Image: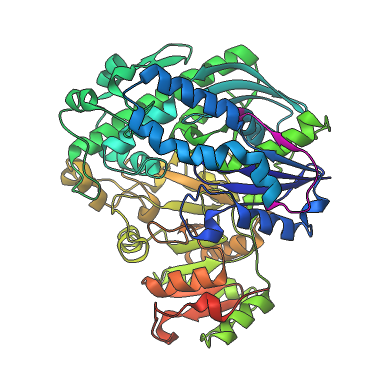
């Protein structure tokens, strides 16, 4: 039985194909359209999923959409009426898309899937999130927390997953939302809402929590059981065109920072403060979930679950024996959750626990060696072929020599993290690597940290964590034995100046608070990536490398060989490993941005 899940129209549209309860394929539309966080109907992602499954639309048994458009429309109308007439401009801006597209989702699906005559089902937004967290997890029984901006009405929920069922225990409704609170500070500090939240998380360690009391006294009434209410006198997101208002400005001493302007200590302190409040709220919700369910395990999903610092805090509290987080926790993962909910809940199919069913989240397109060679030869791109294990040894040596290498191998990752299939790699031991990769490769803010990929069996030798973290969804500290003793002058550095001190023997992945967002790498889920790091370990004695997503600022992670080659040529990357083919930047012809390479050659 083939079930197609779809998410669309808000941000990170995606499609997922589930066959007999197994996740066969999943991808975000942005990877095909090259429009970051693409919200449009995911026609290309659907086409990929069908192709991966060897299907045409008439072979599908069910199609399910990840939320209920009419219920969401009801919430929007009620909210505008509550705030009328102040929300009129926002209302006028929102209505055309609703009238032309969102209210006609069923028709849009049938139009896009010509030949499909089966049912179109609709799941509630936070049910899709909860299903995406529990059903792929290895747990037979688990508490589930979902938290994001808003679905239809729900913004935060505690659910119970047991066997093949997910049931709601309690929820919090719009406009009271942790996701909206965090996004309000994203907006106020000059970053883009729905994409810049991770910048706030990265900026937080540079600041001091000086605004925590202000936030708790004026903006959010946070109770001991994790329930909360926002003071909407300070926010305009419910019916306005901005997240915050003038009263918010007065509370924090001025207007929002202009995008791309100089970051000051104020923004760092604001980032730290809202991060601390978010962690406190998630910990209280987790404690209450434990009390309500008595479960030994916890699952997390929703956009707030991408806050890997908060996730790490929950894990270290030891409230639960283990925690599993959906790697595509945002709206993209809703497509996956909705499809699995149909299989298990709607159709009452049994579920066998005990294994992670996310398949490492390697659920996107891959390209055969012959396809890659045809691409290279068609464009006269200089390259050489290296068989395994020579490929691993050669690339490991290049990384050890402080070269930056693009790594394009196997199936593309589903979710916002690059997990070793579409990655840019560097030497974690290099004091200069973070600055080099931020400024010369990623073209992004210098304060942004990079994540380590570490052999699964060696993670506890370098980081204060005792379990796998394959999806880069947990933050843990570098172990004390790996840290470097700081000089008195270095300990006095303030704000962004903290960046210029070497803190450990893996400085490129050690953040200013000694933390790191960890990915453990395992031979059974990605043998090529594991083989590379194993070779690097053999050469250097270090089982840790830098892993960042294969893209530049403002663009989605690469999908095709052409995407990878363009990114390679437009940056100061040194080498590109495209499957078994190694490309040296010094041997490449001059790049011409005016040529439409895609028109001159298409892969099968």
Residue 201 placement (x, y as % from top left) = 37, 39
Q: Is residue 205 visible?
A: yes
Residue 2 placement (x, y as % from top left) = 80, 47
Question: Is 25 on the left or on the right of 572, as rendered?
Answer: right
- Judging depth in this view, the residue of 388 and 260 nearest the camera is 260
Question: Is 200 on the left or on the right of 51, as rendered?
Answer: left
Q: How many marks?
A: 0
Q: Please say if 102 is above or below 400.
A: above
Q: Please say if 155 is above or below 475.
A: above
- Judging depth in this view, the residue of 63 and 21 nearest the camera is 63
- Judging depth in this view, the residue of 93 and 396 nearest the camera is 93
Quadrant occupied by the C terminus: bottom right
Quadrant occupied by the N terminus: top right
Q: Please say if 78 is above or below 150.
A: above
Q: Is residue 330 visible?
A: no
Residue 237 placement (x, y as % from top left) = 36, 29
At 47% across and 56% down in the image, what residue appears?
35
At 61% across and 76% down in the image, what residue appears?
602
Residue 181: within the magenta? no
At 47% across and 65% down in the image, what residue appears?
540
Residue 133 placement (x, y as % from top left) = 63, 34
Bounds of the magenta segment? 112-126
Q: Please say if 131 is above or below 113.
A: above
Residue 179 in which image quadrant: top left
For the rendered model, the colour scheme is: rainbow
Residue 265 in which image quadrant: top left
Q: Main secondary structure of the magenta part?
A: loop
Residue 123: within the magenta? yes
Question: Is 187 on the left or on the right of 134, as rendered?
Answer: left
């Amino acid at each position: 039985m083939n079930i197609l899940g779809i998410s669309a129209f808000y941000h990170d549209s995606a499609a997922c194909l589930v066959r007999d309860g197994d996740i066969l394929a999943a991808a975000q539309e942005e990877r095909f359209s090259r429009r970051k966080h693409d919200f449009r109907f995911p026609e290309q992602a659907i086409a990929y999923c069908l192709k991966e499954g060897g299907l045409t639309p008439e072979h599908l048994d069910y199609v399910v959409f990840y939320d209920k458009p009419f219920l969401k429309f009801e919430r929007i109308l009620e909210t505008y009426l509550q705030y009328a007439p102040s929300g009129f401009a926002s209302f006028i801006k929102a209505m055309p898309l609703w009238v032309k597209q969102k209210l006609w989702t069923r028709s849009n699906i049938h139009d896009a899937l010509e030949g499909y005559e089966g049912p179109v089902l609709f799941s509630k937004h936070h049910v899709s999130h909860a299903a995406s967290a529990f059903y792929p997890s290895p747990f037979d029984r688990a508490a589930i927390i979902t938290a994001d901006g808003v679905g239809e009405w729900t913004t935060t929920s505690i659910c119970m997953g047991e066997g093949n069922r997910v049931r709601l225990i309690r929820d919090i409704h719009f406009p009271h939302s942790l996701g909206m609170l965090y996004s309000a500070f994203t907006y106020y500090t000059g970053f883009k809402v729905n994409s810049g939240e991770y910048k706030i998380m990265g900026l937080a360690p540079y600041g001091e929590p000086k605004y925590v009391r202000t936030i708790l006294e004026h903006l959010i009434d946070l109770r001991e059981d994790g329930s909360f209410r926002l003071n909407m006198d300070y926010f305009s997101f419910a019916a306005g065109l901005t997240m915050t208002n003038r009263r918010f400005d007065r509370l924090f001493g001025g207007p929002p920072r202009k995008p791309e302007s100089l970051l000051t200590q104020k923004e760092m302190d604001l980032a730290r403060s809202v991060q601390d409040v978010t962690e406190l709220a998630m910990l209280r919700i987790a404690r209450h979930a434990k009390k309500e369910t008595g479960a030994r395990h916890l699952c997390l999903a929703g956009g707030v679950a991408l806050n890997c610092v908060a996730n790490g805090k929950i894990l270290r509290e030891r409230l639960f024996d283990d925690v599993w987080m959906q790697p595509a926790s945002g709206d993209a993962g809703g497509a996956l959750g909705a499809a699995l909910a149909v299989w298990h809940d709607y159709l009452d199919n049994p579920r066998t626990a005990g294994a992670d069913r996310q398949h490492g989240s390697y659920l996107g397109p891959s390209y055969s060696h012959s396809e890659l060679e045809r691409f290279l030869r068609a464009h006269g791109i200089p390259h050489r072929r290296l068989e395994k294990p020579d490929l691993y040894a050669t690339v490991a040596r290049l990384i050890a020599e402080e070269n930056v290498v693009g790594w394009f191998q196997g199936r593309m990752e589903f979710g916002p993290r690059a997990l070793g299939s579409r990655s840019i790699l560097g030497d974690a031991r290099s004091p200069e690597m973070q600055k080099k990769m931020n400024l010369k490769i990623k073209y992004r803010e210098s304060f942004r940290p990079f994540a380590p990929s570490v052999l699964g069996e060696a993670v506890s030798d370098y980081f204060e964590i005792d379990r796998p973290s394959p999806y880069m969804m947990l933050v843990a500290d570098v172990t004390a034995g790996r840290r470097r003793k700081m000089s008195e002058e270095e300990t006095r550095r303030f704000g962004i100046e903290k960046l210029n001190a070497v803190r450990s023997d893996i400085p490129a992945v050690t953040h200013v608070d000694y933390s790191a967002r960890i990915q453990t790498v395992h031979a059974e889920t990605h043998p090529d990536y594991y083989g590379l790091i194993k070779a690097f370990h053999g050469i250097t004695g270090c089982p840790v490398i830098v892993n960042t997503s294969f893209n530049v600022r403002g663009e989605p992670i690469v999908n095709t060989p052409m995407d990878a080659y363009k990114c390679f040529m437009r940056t100061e990357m040194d080498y590109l490993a495209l499957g078994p083919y190694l490309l040296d930047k010094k041997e490449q012809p001059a790049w011409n941005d005016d040529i439409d390479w895609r028109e001159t050659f298409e892969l099968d």
